[in-house]
Amino acid sequence: LLKKRFPHKNLNAKVGDIENIAAQGKSFDYVTALGVLEYLENDKKAMSEINRVLKNGGEAIISFPNYHSPWRIWNRLLIKIIVLHLQIYKNLANRNKHPIKHREYTQKQIKNIAIDANFKIMEIIGYNFKLIPLPLDRLFPKLTIKLAGALKNLKNKKYKWLATAYLVKFKKI
């Protein structure tokens, strides 16, 4: 799909297992991982693999859900309330827990990930300034989108923590 939408003779796009990338070391100038690391058992392994396949001085753009986002805080609270009731049901029905993991990251955790994987952080920006809590964001999607659009200029400011996620530009060192 990427090659179809952005035809360029030098574009070499791959899709695969980010914890075991099927490529030789130092093969790519850029790596992008959006909406991936938060679902992995071992995000450090993925970051190590990204480092392995990047050329020296190569860059990676990676998204991280923002732990301190007001929208995510509200969702965690709401989920705890719902899960409490669901857990009672699951215990009674003898059902297993949901297998999908999901992590959220603080900026400090992202900085530690960069250090551990031998990356330098070039830039951290916030994106998706979704402040209207669930379920109101679903009931009033136009208002949610309008407010998020009005706040997008905060992406590089001290208020970027209001965003639901970060886009981080890493450089291999």
Image (cartoon, helix red, strand yellow):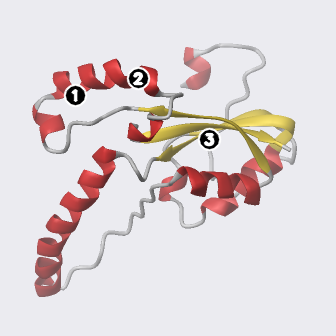
Residue of label 2: 152
Amino acid type, callout 2:
Lys
Along the horizontal axis of the image, is 26 left or right of 166?
Answer: right
Q: Are marks 1 and 2 in contact (CB under 8 Å)?
A: no
Q: Is residue 19 visible?
A: no
x and y, in percent, of residue 100 in the image: 39, 63
Question: Badge 1 local density, few (<14 within 10 Å), some, or many (20+)?
Answer: some
Residue at horizontal 18 percent and vertical 27 percent from the top:
141
Q: Nearer the viewer, mark 2 or mark 3?
A: 2
Quadrant of image for the C terminus: top right
Residue at horizontal 27 percent and vertical 79 percent from the top:
96
Q: Secondary structure at mark 1?
A: helix
N-terminal-most mark, 2 or 3: 3
Residue of label 1: 144
Amino acid type, callout 3:
Val
**How far is disc 3 from disc 1 in space, using C-alphas?**
32 Å
In depth, the one of 158 and 50 nearer the eye is 158
